[in-house]
Image (cartoon, rainbow, N blue to C red):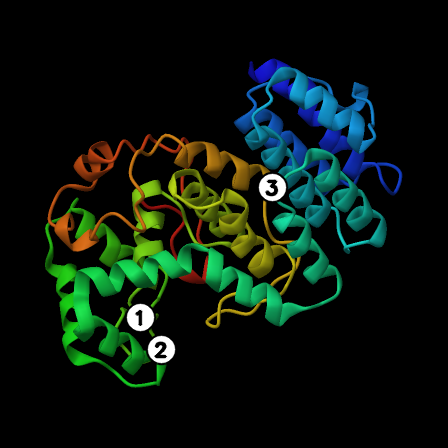
Amino acid sequence: MRTRLATAGLPCLMTVARLHGTPSTRALRAIEGIRDHLLMTSNMELSALPSLEPEAMAAGITSIDADPEWRERILRGMTLVAMFDGEPSREALELLERTAKAFRVDAAPVISYRHVMHDRQALVRLDLVRRSFVRDAARATLRDGGLPMLAATLKVLSGHRDDSTLKRFQSLNDYPSGSFGKAYADFIRINQFSFPGDVGGPPVPVFRHDCCHVLGGYGTTAAEEGGVVGFQAGFERLDPFDVLMFAMAEFELGIGASPFIPGEFGQLDPDRVFAGLEHGSHVKTDLIRDIDPWDHFADPLEMVRERFAIPARGRDPEYPQTCGASSQD
């Protein structure tokens, strides 16, 4: 089935990559990442694939599986390839619009591309808050911590320290070696971050994302951030495109989706993004929405990974040189 879907879907991605002639290196790396990690067809030669009109794309995909989910996935993939290809173009937008119409699927990814092309950064940020993992992290924090945690979050966002929250997180420094909680504290130390509750520290909901770094084994370079967001896209009960768009906006398009770090251009590793997506697809629990990390911090990290069916990533995490550490278990 994967081979047949790859035969129908990869030409769609190559059609986008060839819009301006020879495919760019980054567009090709994105397609290779989808081919190798999601479709598992690394032996398929991309240069031999044809370019297709949207109607032919739709007919080919539908002949294999009429479920619109597959056409939706391929439209998302085409949109991501277009974003990796460089400066958004009217030609790419037109192709994506025609494809969404031929596929008869939700054109939300195309709308995101249009916003990027027209430099509507405020709309992109609004979409990310509304549809990305940030919303679920905030809701889970309120669920597990109640109004006191909401108050602590608002206090930090206003530039003030919340001592009770800070002391609770600092207590993780004293957790047993090898525990999930100690690994989280080490992650904060290695990266020279501040704990939630401290002035300059992240709002409490962000710690759920940082826990994904620890559980999945991801570092904090821009390429690793793309990998961990891909990891989250694999297990979250959200549209994976919406989750990946957070990383695309922050580290590829320079939009600055997060208020805590400036946007960067062209810093994602496309292969790492899609390898992360495949990695996260094995996890059977939404680690952002469905667990309270405090319920598991005292347990050994490897036990927690086994509990949530998190497989070994297969590569060491990478950190910026300023962190003074090259790897962490």
- Quadrant containing the N terminus is top right
Spatial separation of the CA atoms under disc 1 and disc 3: 29 Å
* Residue that carries the numbered disc 2 in the rendered image: 200
Residue 7, disc:
none
User: Disc 3 marks which amino acid?
Assistant: Pro
Check the image and report above or below for 294 versus 165: above
Please say if the residues under marks 1 and 2 sit with CB atoms less than 8 Å apart. yes
* Residue that carries the numbered disc 3 in the rendered image: 270
User: Disc 2 marks which amino acid?
Assistant: Gly
Q: Dot 2: few (<14), some (14–19), or many (≥20) neighbours within 10 Å?
A: some
Query: Horizontal and vertical percent for residue 37?
Result: 53, 28
Q: Nearer the viewer, residue 34 or 272?
A: 34
Check the image and report above or below for 289 versus 198: above
Sequence-first disc among 1 and 3: 1
Q: Nearer the viewer, residue 41 or 183?
A: 41
State which quadrant residue 5 falls in: top right
Sequence-first disc among 1 and 2: 1
Measuring 37% from the left and 46% from the top, which residue is drawn there?
327
Q: Is residue 229 visible?
A: yes
Query: Horizontal and vertical percent for residue 312?
Result: 34, 31
> Which of labels 1 and 3 is toward the front?
3
Circle 2 SS class:
loop
* Residue that carries the numbered disc 1 in the rendered image: 194
